[in-house]
Image (cartoon, grey):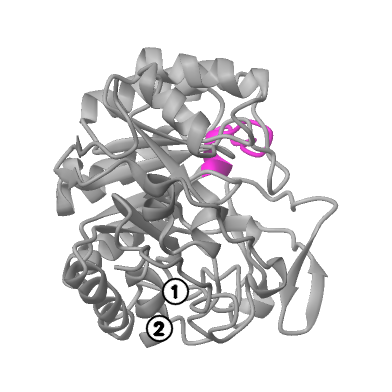
Amino acid sequence: MTNLFEPLRAGDLNLNNRVVMAALTRARAGRTHIPNVLMAEYYSARARAGLIITEATMIASDGCAFTGEGGLFDEACVKGWRTVTDAVHQRGGKILVQLWHPGRAAHSLLNNGVQPISSTDRAIRNDTIHTPDGAKPYEIPRRLDISEIPGIIAQFRAAAARSSFAGFDGVQLHAAHGYLLDQFLRDSVNDRIDAYGGSIENRARLLLEVVDAVGAEIGLGRISVRISPLVSFNDISDSNATELVRYLAHQLTKRQIAFLELRQSDFRDPAEHALAQVTRQNFPGALFVNGAYDFESSQAVLATGSADAVVFGRPFIANPDLVARFSANRPLNAMDPKTLYTPGPAGYTDYPLWTGGAE
C-alpha cells in the first residue's frame, strides 16, 4: 500500500515523498513584495517535504490582498525568489510558486488607489480586509470587460516565465478560496452573460486559458491547479460543485498537468468526502488532497488510492521538520496564531526542532 514516505512522479516532477507543504500566506516580504533572506531560511528549513508550494504570489503589482505577500511581477522579485529557491534546492527540496490574483478580495488602499477587479461588480459581503488604515469593508469591484481578459492571461503567463528565471520547479495556479480565477469558476459570484459566464464551460474558460498559456510557457507537466469547490471563504459557493469538478477534472486530464490539488474545508465533512470521490473518479492523474489531515488519516487516504499525496498547512508552520516527526512518530509543536502575519522571525523561523529531526 502507498504511504507518505514513498516517492511520487507527478507530471515532470519527481518527489522524494508525498508530504507536501501547502501554500501559506505569512506576509514576510514587506511592502516591496520582494522575497528576502528570512523567507529563504523559512522555506529551506522545510526542504524535506516532497514538495513546497509557496504563499500566494502576486502576478501584478496592483494585485495585493495581504500586506507583505511575495510578488513575481518584476526583476527584483525574480532575484528575491532566486535566493529562496537556491536555498531550498541546496537542501535537496523542490518548490513551486503559487501564482494568484486576488480579484475582488483586494482593496485600493493596498494597491495605490486601484479599484479591485472581478468577474462581477458585487463586493464580498459581511467581512473586512486589513489595510494600512486598519480593517475596512471590501470594496465594490470593477467588472472586467471581456476585452481585458487576454491581459489577465498574459499576466499569468509572464509570471510563469519569470518563475523559471527565479529557479522554481513549476507553478501552481490558485483557482480556489474565492480569488480571481475562482470568481470566474463559481456561479454565486460569476454573473456574466458573455463567453466567460453562465455555463460551466464558460465559467471554466478563463482558468483553462490560463493553464494553456502557462503550459505553452513552461510545459503542462510543471503546472498544478488548486481548486476548493465547497470552501465558502471570501463569500463564494457553487450551485453544482459536483458537475463543476467533473468538468474541470476531464479538461485538466486532457492537458496532463502535473497534479490537481483539491482543497477541502475538512476531509471528514460528508459533502467534502463525496466530492473527493468524484474528483478521484474523474481525474486519473496525480491528485493531492488538503483538508485538516493528520498523519493517520493521510496514510489512510493514500492506502486506499483515493489520493496520491497529502498537502499539509498548519502543521508545517510550527514544524519545519514535519517529515522527520511523522517518520519517527514524534509529537508536533503547537502553532502560535498571533504570529502568523507579523513581521520578523518570531513564529516564523524560531519553532524548535526535536533532537535528531534536524537536517
Image location of residue 72, percent across then percent down: 35, 72
Asked whether the residues under the numbered discs 2 and 1 touch, taking CB atoms below 8 Å apart as contact, a structural biologist would say: yes
What is the tally of numbered marks visible in this picture? 2
Asked whether residue 53 is drawn in magenta, I would say no
Closer to the chain start, of discs 2 and 1, is: 2
Q: Which residue is mark 1?
A: 70
* Rendered-image quadrant of the N terminus: top left
Amino acid at pointer 1: Gly
Q: Amino acid at mark 2?
A: Ile
- Is residue 176 found left or right of 11 in the rendered image? right
Q: Would residue 125 be visible to someone looking at this image?
A: yes
In this view, the residue in front, 202 or 297, is 297
User: How far from the left and from the top, in percent, is residue 167?
Assistant: 19, 69
- Mark sitting on residue 198: none
- Dot 2 crowding, Cα within 10 Å, few <14, some 14–19, many 20+: many
At 53% from the left and 62% from the top, the residue drawn is 317
Residue 188 belongs to the span the image colors magenta:
yes
What range is drawn magenta here?
Answer: 182-193
Q: Is residue 79 above or below residue 229?
A: below
Q: Which mark is residue 34?
A: 2
Q: Main secondary structure of the magenta part?
A: loop
- Residue at image location 41% in from the left, 68% down from the top: 355
